[in-house]
Amino acid sequence: MAELLLELFSEEIPARMQDRAAADLARLLNDALTEAGLDVSKPVHHSTPRRLTVVLEEVPEATADVREERKGPKADAPEKAVNGFLGSVGLSRDQVEERETPKGTFLFAVIEKPGQPTAEILPGLIEGAIQKLPWPKSMRWGAHQVRWVRPLHSILCLFGGEVVPVSYGPVTSSNTTRGHRFHAPDAFAVTDFADYRAKLRAAKVMLDRDERKRVINDGAMDSQPRGILYQADPRLLDEVAGLVEWPVPVWGRIDDAFMDVPREVLESSMATHQKYFCAVNDSTDGSLAPYFIAVANLEAEDGGQAIVAGNEKVLRARLSDAKFFWDKDRERSLESRVSDLDPIVFHAAMGSMRRKAERLADLARWLAPKVGADEGDAHRAGILAKADLTTEMVGEFPELQGFMGRYYARHDGEPEALADAIRWHYSPAGPGDLCPSDPVSVAVALADKLDTLAGFFGIGEKPTGSKDPYALRRAALGVIRLILENGIRLNLSATFNHALRAIAGDFSEEHQKMYFDRHREGEAFRAQTTIELLDFIADRLKVTLREQGVRHDLITAVFALGGEDDLVRLTWQVEALQRLVESEDGGNLLAAYRRAANILRIEEKKDGAVHSGPADRGAFVEAAEAELGEALAAALEKADAALASEDFGGAMSAMAALRGPVDAFFDNVTVNADDAALRANRLKLLAEIRATLHRVADFSKIEG
């Protein structure tokens, strides 16, 4: 066994690509070696801004000998068949064997391939892995035809301490690498991974990404000023760890003149644009402190004073712009900006952003009573929701849309609930995003997503496969979260119909003709599109419930009943069904249902007819028949009453009570009686079992 070490050294690789690329390189290399017949140890990968490294500690020094037998045609087969077999195995007739088998005498070829030294096959395997490495974006450099994410400078490749001759474009392998760009830029030779890691460390390169993250975190906390707390940001930390090879956290100060700019602006300027960490005051309110933490990529002789001063200067310039935008934007009210939305196109087939805001406002007002919101506030919040898109601040920091709208609304004296609705109307934008709960915010957020879904489905722009350019799946999940987390009882059919009626008038002439001509009239168009939207929401709800641990077959069993578009009711019903099937009575009842359904399926196929209830109670012969008939009637009455009052647990309990009578029926009654009339009546009784249980779920969809 010998160690294989590979390093690809280049110009700075984008931070977001480094770790994935190193993992891909390790996977491709491992697969190539395995396919070549080498049983290798699990590869370990590392990445820094300028290098991808993979090491496999135990690689066999040669591939194993291979002995393979292939069976050919019969010995007396036509000459053409025999020659075809000999050509496929590369042997002559006297090199194959004739063997007797129970089916006659056949030709057998024994192919023996001796193992190859690993060092001889490694160059091709490694070069193939490098060529297959997937990059989100790649480039050519100079006059070279090969592609890489950034210009490649060197390849270090050692197997058992010896250089493996690998080339990629103009670059050929050696036993050398380089350290830190500034601290140790000269090349140095290494003998194995331990030597490589130690010498990189001495050359001011921390190879381990997790170590760099720890150094950043610990360094920031250890040097924080009194009363100030470093604000950890895992996503930013992961990115910054990909920007430095020798991290040195340094604290800088924000000019007090900028501290009245909204916190989100300061945080966005620092974290998103400058890759600085923020700090908060060590107090109960956790307000933003006038400090930032930058991460230098070297140890400065002056202790980092010049680095801090340079970063403060850069931040001062950016925050000066932000403060100018902040002051300038407040010279006009949000209401005065609504007309500025006219030139902004929401979508070529659905009009301007202003029309989007007006539809959003009307739908929010329509939704307001259903979510307990004030209609006037909901409508006005909808009208103003998109107005901050015209501000200088959002133009410079697009990620602050909504956030800035709230600040400007407050400045204009709008009610707090209205301002909050502007802030939250894009939420929830993902599984980790907070879901608004204030009624006005809920109405506006729902209206925004419902209008978007109705519009894009209306013009036929639906998600397909993995493609969802307008984030409609995210919008649907947002609708589901808003409804479920706030317990909103909403008739989605009527809601989508209302949204479609509003947006149809804004469709482009082309799309109006396409859809209204196809459906002849608007009502048919709305009905068909509503069905498509409800199916789409149902699919997303299934995903949501599965992620919450609900069995997929139970979700399918409830959804199979159809006709329900109240997501809260659907969820309650699925939860109650899960409790039923997890109980002993429920499990036995499911087994009895299957028995009844299987008998019905077999006999209906045999008879060429469907047996449906109700059974004739006067024709019952056995006591178990009569008891089951009474139990079914009682269960149906109780279940219907429970369903009417949305007591799904009660409905499931009514079904569970059938376990005993159903078991007794199958223990004591022969369904396929010799008397045809008696048999038919008993099959109708089985059909009643099936129909009664289908009042709460389609039990045929339940597994296990």
Image (cartoon, rainbow, N blue to C red):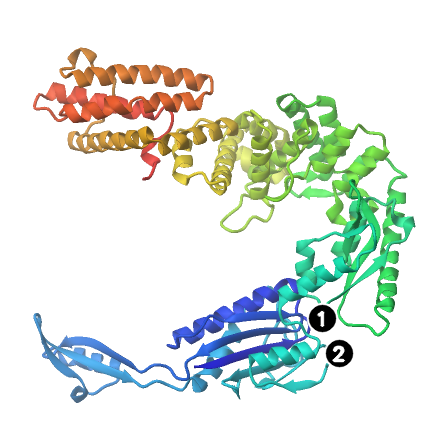
Quick check: can you spot residue 266? Answer: yes
Q: Which element is circle 1 on? A: loop
Quick check: can you spot residue 87? Answer: no
Q: Residue at x 49, y 68 (%)?
A: 27
Looking at marks 2 and 1 on the same chain, the residue that comes earlier in the sequence is marked by: 2
Give, as a three-letter code, the residue at label 1. Answer: Trp
Q: Residues within 10 Å of mark 2 (few under 14, many from 20)?
A: some
Relative to 640, 81 lies left or right? left
Q: Residue at x 31, y 34 (%)?
A: 700
How many badges with numbers are in the image?
2
Give, as a three-letter code, the residue at label 2. Answer: His
Relative to 172, 645 lies left or right? left
Q: Which element is circle 2 on? A: loop
Provide residue 309's location: percent of width, then percent of height. Answer: 88, 64
Provide residue 664's location: percent of width, then percent of height. Answer: 20, 23
Residue that badge 1 annotates: 246
Residue that badge 2 annotates: 183
In which image quadrant can residue 379 be found?
Answer: top right
Q: Most extreme residue toward the top, as rendered?
A: 618
Using the image, determine if residue 608 lies above or below residue 184.
above
Q: Nearer the viewer, residue 300 or 187?
A: 300
Relative to 266, 55 lies left or right? left
Find residue 327 and name its label: none
Provide residue 101's location: percent of width, then percent of height. Answer: 9, 73
Using the image, determine if residue 586 lies above or below residue 29.
above
Q: Most extreme residue toward the right, as rendered?
A: 257
Proximity of marks 2 and 1: CB atoms separated by less than 8 Å: yes
